[in-house]
Amino acid sequence: MASRYHEVYEGWKQDPDKFWSEAAEAIDWVTPPSKVFDANAGVYGRWFPDGVCNTCYNAVDRHADGGRGDQPALIYDSPITGTARTYTYKDLKAEVAALAAVLADLGIEKGDRVIVYMPMIAEAAFAMLACARIGAIHSVVFGGFAAKELATRIDDAKPKAVISASCGIEPGRVVAYKPLLDGAIDHAEHKPEACLILQREQAEADMIAGRDHDYAALVGAARSAGRDPGCTPVAATDPLYILYTSGTTGVPKGVVRDNGGHMVALKWSMNAIYGIDPGETYWAASDVGWVVGHSYIVYAPLLHGCATILFEGKPVGTPDAGVFWRVIADHKVAALFTAPTAFRAIKKEDPDGTFIGKYDLSTLRTLFLAGERADPDTIHWAEEMLKVPVIDHWWQTETAWAIAGNPIGLGQLPVKYGSPTVAMPGYDVQVLDDAGHPVDAGTLGNIVVKLPLPPACLPTLWQNDERFAESYLDEFPGYYKTADAGYMDEDGYLFIMARTDDIINVAGHRLSTGGMEEVLAGHPDVAECAVIGIADKLKGQSPAGFVVLKAGVDRPEADIEKELVGLVREKIGPVAAFKIAMVVARLPKTRSGKILRGTMRQIADGEDYKMPATIDDPAILDEIGAALKGHGIGG
Ligand code: COA
Ligand code: AMP
């Protein structure tokens, strides 16, 4: 079948208002929008400016009350605890309504913020949906972040309440969340009024009288009483959530998502991009702490009336490299979406795919990969093993859905390995040189999107229009800067090659090397430092830190290196996967004092590099090479 992509993309380009107003018909509005886009509102315009709606209603009630009540909505599958439970749309509505009633009892109102700091359990999704139900704004913080990261988010979002659990479970260890939460609240200037804590049997949390409340007791009572505050109508432009993502400094950026545009774009994507019909099972093996989890574990599949899977486990080791196939077979998954790193982990454990033959994978039609560059080797292996199309697609926390992809529902386009294929309708993607001029096909440059961004993309950063403009809009006037570099070929296929800022991608997790440098610089013995991302076979990249000690420090270097590794783990969290720190005598710099991080990375990755013309002292590069060799890194 010929793909309808070109026709649909052109249709959008000719008349974006018509395209998005048709897509908006798939949403149940309290008051349908009379206008699709207002170019004069907000920083660069706002979508569906006078629409009134409720996201929870569209994700839950509409299906629960409209013929899908007994259909599975959310499947919690937890190999790490050996439990599984299926919630129908009716069950989901009961859980979410009860929790919403409890939140309302705690004084949470429309527009209030609620931080959700939870492991991968069904209650994390209930918490997000319950906030949406009463018009509160959730901000989910990934469970692998440490207390300080949580504190930064508490101070920025100023939540009235926090919903958390006593613990998360990682292979071989129970991660007690409550001490991290208490530490974060102690550390933060802003103090949430209430914490709702789900006690898990693996670790009982100590409760603080007056502030902490037991989730199971309060929600259980509300559920038994059949309480439901109902769905609060909100403006399409009101925030649904804030999701913090790494910026160039240690202070993360609060990406704001609206209600109306978000629903329209996500609902549209489910069939057009993923080729999924309502009633099918869709599985995004990610975490609710990341944007993939927000969009494709919780909101999009539920808006579309699918069953979604919330998986508490790892691709390997829980219990083995066959767990993904077991989940697909058990729940008849039609589409799997995960990060390439998960497949690299499976391939490493089970290169011949011996586990695959043990399961019935006949329901699986497509594998989608995103979160980091999908290397052709991994794609080839997955294609060979699974015998289904393997689709790379490219997006960011900021966008909530794919900027570029291969739209299965519109008809698959030919695959070019190493490319996430073409711009999706809504995105006018261009490649510019540093002066802002378009470059020729095949030439590397800054990848930008012509404004306005499509529905669901961030309208701004939380209470910070200035930082939004400065971070994304000022450098290339009229365009959104993705901060990814790459090129477009003559067929319009995009190739995403590298970040243009100091963000690195570790196992599909987006991290700021600037944030890690701030932590290293806080060590009393450190005079200056640099953190770079070096190539890692499994995780794509992993961070490595170089520090110069203050004059007069004569403690053993190995002790200091160990302390630095511990410090990043304590301040940012284990998810930073910061395991390499090395003391060096000097850092390579330009004559104007800029650290040559790019050249250091090339040395670490064993790449050929050109001696930077502006280097202050070329001999330092040899010292860096020797230090890396001393740690078993580099060619
Ligand atoms: N809570 C607490 N700690 C967490 C955590 C969480 N939610 N998630 C990860 N961590 C910890 C891990 O336990 C690990 O700790 P350790 O240093 O004590 O071993 C550390 O953070 C690094 O975790 P991770 O990067 O996940 O590495 P890993 O070696 O444990 O697992 C993979 C490797 C490839 C299996 C794993 O990274 C993976 O499943 N990746 C998929 C990524 C993904 O879904 N990304 C989302 C974008 S789509
Ligand atoms: P995050 O905001 O965590 O989703 O990370 C977004 C960043 O991850 C992008 O800006 C890219 O640098 C990278 N990324 C995500 N998906 C892809 C992909 N398919 N190919 C290449 N890079 C990707």
Image: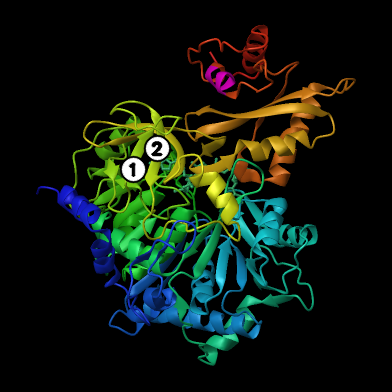
Side of 411 relative to 606 (left or right): left
Determine which residue is flagged by label 1.
429
Given residues 11 and 121, the one toward you in this image is 11
Residue 56 sits in quarter:
bottom left
Verify CB contact (< 8 Å) between mark 1 and mark 2: yes
Mark 1 or mark 2: whose residue is earlier in sequence: 1
In the rendered image, the vertical position of residue 376 relative to residue 4, given as above or below: above
Locate residue 403, reporting x and y percent.
Answer: 35, 48
Disc 2: CA contacts within 10 A as few (<14), some (14-19) or many (>=20): many
Q: Amino acid at mark 2?
A: Ile
Given residues 214 and 541, the one toward you in this image is 541
Is 585 contained in the magenta span? no
Locate residue 124, reporting x and y percent.
Answer: 53, 66
Q: Tell me the magenta residue range.
A: 598-602
Q: Amino acid at mark 1?
A: Val
Respond yes or no on whether mark 2 lies under 8 Å from ligand 2. Answer: no
Q: Quadrant of ligand 2?
A: top left
Extreme residue toward the bottom, this view: 225
